[in-house]
Image: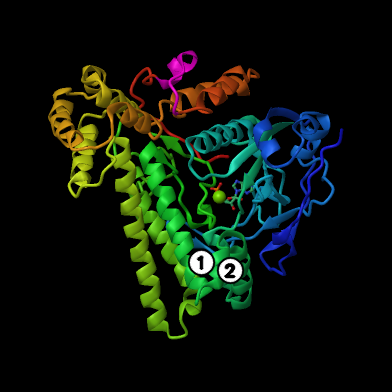
Amino acid sequence: MTAHFSFDNSYARLDAPFHRPTLPTPVPAPRLVQLNRPLAEELGLDPDALDSQEGAEILSGNRIPRGAEPIAAAYAGHQFGNFVPQLGDGRAILLGEVVDRAGRRRDIQLKGSGPTPFSRGGDGRAALGPVLREYIVSEAMAALGIPTTRALAAVATGEPVYRETALPGAVLTRVAASHVRIGTFQFLAARGDDDAIGRLADHVIARHDPQAAEAPNPYRALLEGVARRQARLVARWMQVGFIHGVMNTDNMSISGETIDYGPCAFMDGYDPATVFSSIDRNGRYAYANQPGIAQWNLTRLAECLLSRLDPDESRAIEIAQDILAGFAEAFNAAYVQGFREKIGLHDEQDEDAALIQDLLGRMARETADFTLTFRGLGTAAETPEADASVRALFADPAAYDGWAVRWRARLAAESLAPAARKAAMDAVNPAVIPRNHRVEEALAAAIAGDTAPFERLNAALARPYEDRPDFASYAALPPEREAAYRTFCGT
Ligand code: AMP
Ligand code: MG
């Protein structure tokens, strides 16, 4: 059986200064650590053919499948607010695009596949731990229903990579709606290549915003589309306690998918100031800052498209400001609506936002576990006796009681029946998230050669909205408060 990909490489075909043909560098002993069979099926690939030594050769970059046109993409980016005019795929290579079974175009990219023209002195490689971390967290996000790049496979290379110490090397096969980032536009803007911005924008419109092509000003509609997707995305992050950790403009996808899982993590106890990344010393990318940072990043994109918004510069600036204000509105609406659903409100009332803020304020003061509090509310909404397990999550349980009185009064005005309400709440309040201690445990075991905990964690995360007795321990509180949990970028 031969692994076959029906490639159709629209990005590689662009006449563009922003990608370069680049071949992966072969590795000595590729071995499949994990293959995402359901995703392979979705992509129209044969999982059995990939689940083989030939598959490992392809998914490590040792063998280039027919029809692939491997390229490394150039992009720029604001990293922690500082502009870097050239970053690019320093250790990733786009093999090509396939059109999946649902008719969606998907990039297939190898990450950790060796040096490229954009490696800037880096080795172009990735370590097994961070590869598996991206695998776990991106697949968890997909199961949560949050737009994200996906993980098709993780392959161990049989070769060490040298970070602080020697670590086992690996390659991740990442699947994305596209890899065009805000930084891709910034790369061209920094070079003053206005024609190329037009070609890139037209490519993105065709791919992600086809209806924008019909708009009076397609570029304006494109910017509106990107802003709308980001508003929804970041609201979804906030609603599951996700902290991306490195929201540089090169890590913000035009497609609206979560991309680049480096120092990301989910919080346990609710604290809006939470930062996990060891390199984010000033908390720029703290949980509560994420919407503001997304808007800042969109402003950078608007700057790249400014001359296309209107020939008159002051008018163009006005249009951009309107779109950015629209982002804030769309974010707030999605944020409030999402939390409204999380606390079981079906009908809309003006005071809902205040009720939500009251709960979040109390959770923050009492470091209540974010995931378990909301999951518990679903049960408490149906059976008030279940209050006991929710209030126990608050350092001072009385803080919950004060809010619960207000909440019940509000629920009394709802039209939805309690059983239907609980089902609706359970469908938006996950029982299982990738808890940091579980992720660390799975990665440590995998690095030591035992992938069983990794596979079990993936299985637990695959159906996050269900209470499954077999996986109850994955829904439990962490053993102790992980106040000092730190994540590292070193993917
Ligand atoms: P990230 O923080 O993962 O978004 O990466 C920022 C930039 O550093 C990107 O241009 C990456 O391609 C590049 N980079 C990260 N790690 C490596 C590596 N080991 N070798 C070469 N380039 C890298
Ligand atoms: Mg990146």
Cβ of mark 1 under 8 Å from ligand 2: the answer is: no
* Image point (35%, 63%), residue name: 326
Q: Is residue 3 left or right of residue 345?
A: right
Q: Amino acid at mark 2?
A: Ala
* Image point (45%, 69%), residue name: 302
Q: Residues within 10 Å of mark 2 (few under 14, many from 20)?
A: some
First along the sequence among labels 2 and 1: 2
The residue to which callout 1 is attached is 222
Looking at this view, is 258 or 300 the one in front? 258
Q: Is residue 441 left or right of residue 71?
A: left
Task: Report helix, strand or loop for mark 1.
Answer: helix
The residue to which callout 2 is attached is 201
Looking at this view, is 193 or 465 the one in front? 465
Q: Quadrant of residue 452?
A: top right
Q: Amino acid at mark 1?
A: Leu
**Majority SS type along the magenta span:** helix
Percent of width and height locating residue 58: 79, 39
- Please determine whether, in this image, residue 219 is positioned above or below residue 326: below
